Each structure stands twice: as structure tokens, then as C-alpha cells.
Image (tube, rainbow, N blue to C red):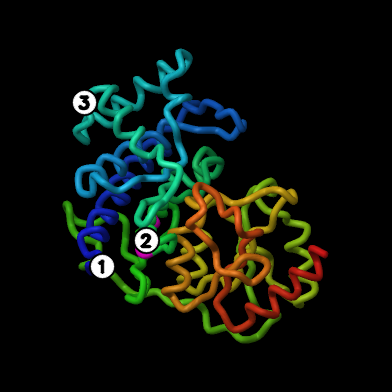
Amino acid sequence: MNDLARELETALRAVRSASVATRAVQASLQGSALEKSDRSPVTVADYAAQALICRALGAAFAADPIIAEEDMDTLRAPEAEALRAQLLTLLQPFGLATIDAVLEAVGRGAANTAGERAWTLDPIDGTKGFLRGDHYAIALALLIDGRPEIGVLGCPGLDCDGRRGTLLWARRGQGAFHAPLDLDGDGDPRAQARPVQVSAQLEPAALRLCESFESGHSAHGQSAQMQAQWGMTAAPVRMDSQAKYGVLARGEAEVYARLPTRADYREKIWDHAAGVLLVEEAGGRVSDLDGRPLDFSAGRTLRHNRGVLASHGPHHEQLLAALGRVIS
């Protein structure tokens, strides 16, 4: 394996471009949401981010499959004509000049299996937060043999060094970093990188729980029971998207629990791959609710895992035990 320097540079540039573009859409959003078949909202920003990132990956690594969240069914539908027009207007300055070019780029994300090497992408993680004007993330990870080796998060709502917007990234074995999203010109964010590290908090009662803003995404009631068992006194930090992994990696919370809302639910790989590597490289630990590592090799879902627990590390086993008592 090479040192993946080219892969990291490509991923950082692509996620940064997509973050800047989607932030502009969020600022001007006026009812451009449609609905997917699962009734979650989708916007022009989803497709814009996927098109920009898939085009960059396709140009640099044409043989790599990309497992991305969005497909083209909604985008091709007759009722999506206005969405297609908005999308083209947004992407033309980025060199995607025709709707066919946009569709081709979006379609690169249609892979279903990872193989030995693949990228996984969530172009807008936290769509409801995006629509509310709150936190969302653009999440990209490179999987090799089913294991995240590069993870990049664009978090336009997180501050970094007093500036709005953060780019976070990790490469296995080389640590985790962040930099402001807004750089001078087309600068390399690695030139302004600072390492991030999980919290050193050891007092159980002082642990801060980070959980999904939407109760439909994680069982808030069970999270509250775990907090009570553990004696946590801080109010939970609720935000959308993998920005929660970024907050945990930066030491601004100690625990993130993703608890199934139904017995047969399995997480999507693009919702966790980048964030998991970020937390692990910042010194934390991530497992499923049975204490097993997350398995990203089984296609588009974590079908071999049940739920997710991420923590700063020292109390991970005890937190698992507390969750086990609550769930049982």
C-alpha cells in the first residue's frame, strides 16, 4: 500500500469545495426540498456535494467504486425539473456545465459493495439540520479491506480557531487534525492543521453525552436511562450529523451513543466511516453495542453490528454495560 498522500489531498480538496458550495445553498435555502421514498428531505445540496466529490474521485482514481447515499431516481423524476435547474446553476461555476455531466458524476456513487478498496460518501449528513440552518456534515472515507483508512468531515457549522466552519480529517496511524474551512485562495488545509485529541475527563458524573438532535435517529429515552445509571449530570449535547464525531474527537464531549430505534435497524456505512476513524485517531474508541468493532465490509449497511457507541476511551466497557442493562 502507498502512503495514501494523494488520496488524502484529493479527499480534502473535494470535501472542502463541496462544503463551501453547500453552505451557500443553506444560506439561501427557500423551500428547495423534495422527499425521498423514505420521506426524509433531500435538497439540491445533496446532489451538488455528491457530484463534486464523485467527479474529483473519478478523475483521480477512476477504478475505485464509490458507495454514496444519493441515487439518481429522484433527480431524474419529471417533478424534479426545478431541482435539476437549481443544481446546474450551482455547479456550472465548478465546471459541470450540463445536466448530463451532473448525472454522470452523481451516478458514480452507485456502488453497493466495497471490495478491496472503495470510497463511501454521505454528501449531506444531517439533512434536517441543514434545512433548519443548523449542523450538518459532508462525510467521505476511503475503505481498504473493509476498514476506514482515510476519513474527512466538512462541518460548516462548527467553529475552528474562532472562524465558522471546520474541516476535520484522519489517516490511520497518523493522527487526527482540523483546520478552518475558509482558507486563503485554494490553500492546502494541511498547512493550517492542528492535531485534535479526545477529552481526558475521568470523572464519570462529568461526562458529556452527544446524541442525535432527531429522536427518530436514536433512542433518546434509553440514552437518558444510561445517563441516570452512570450518574451523568450534564445536559446532552444534541446536534445532527457526524459533526458529533468531530466534537468528540476535539474533546468537547466524551460519549456518543447511537441506539437502534427498532430491532431490525442497521446503520449505513456512510453515516459512520469517516467519524469512526477520526475519533479513533484522536485517541478514542468506537464499537457497536456488543463491544465489537464496526464492520464496513458488508455493503451499504453495518449489518453485522447493532448500534454504535463512541467514547473518549477510559470508561468504554462500563458505558457498554450500562447500555446493556438499559436495552435488556
Magenta stretch: give its range: 149-153
Query: Between 22 and 216, which is closer to the camera in this rendering?
Result: 216
- Give how far apart the Cα atoms at labels 3 and 1 are: 36 Å
Give the left or right position of residue 159, taking residue 318 as reference.
left
Number of residues whose C-alpha sits closer than 10 Å to that of mark 1, classed few (under 14), some (14–19) or many (20 or more): few
- The image quarter in which residue 117 lies: bottom left
Label pair 1/2, CB-CB below 8 angstroms: yes
The furthest residue to the front: 115
Helix, strand or loop at mark 2:
strand
- Give how far apart the Cα atoms at labels 3 and 2 are: 33 Å
User: As displayed, is residue 36 above or below residue 144?
Assistant: above
Residue 169: x, y in percent?
35, 64
Residue 249: x, y in percent?
47, 70
Residue 42 in magenta stretch? no
What amino acid does circle 3 point to?
Ala
Query: Between 27 and 276, which is closer to the camera in this rendering?
Result: 276
Q: Which residue is mark 3?
A: 97
Q: Which residue is mark 2?
A: 144
The furthest residue to the bottom: 202
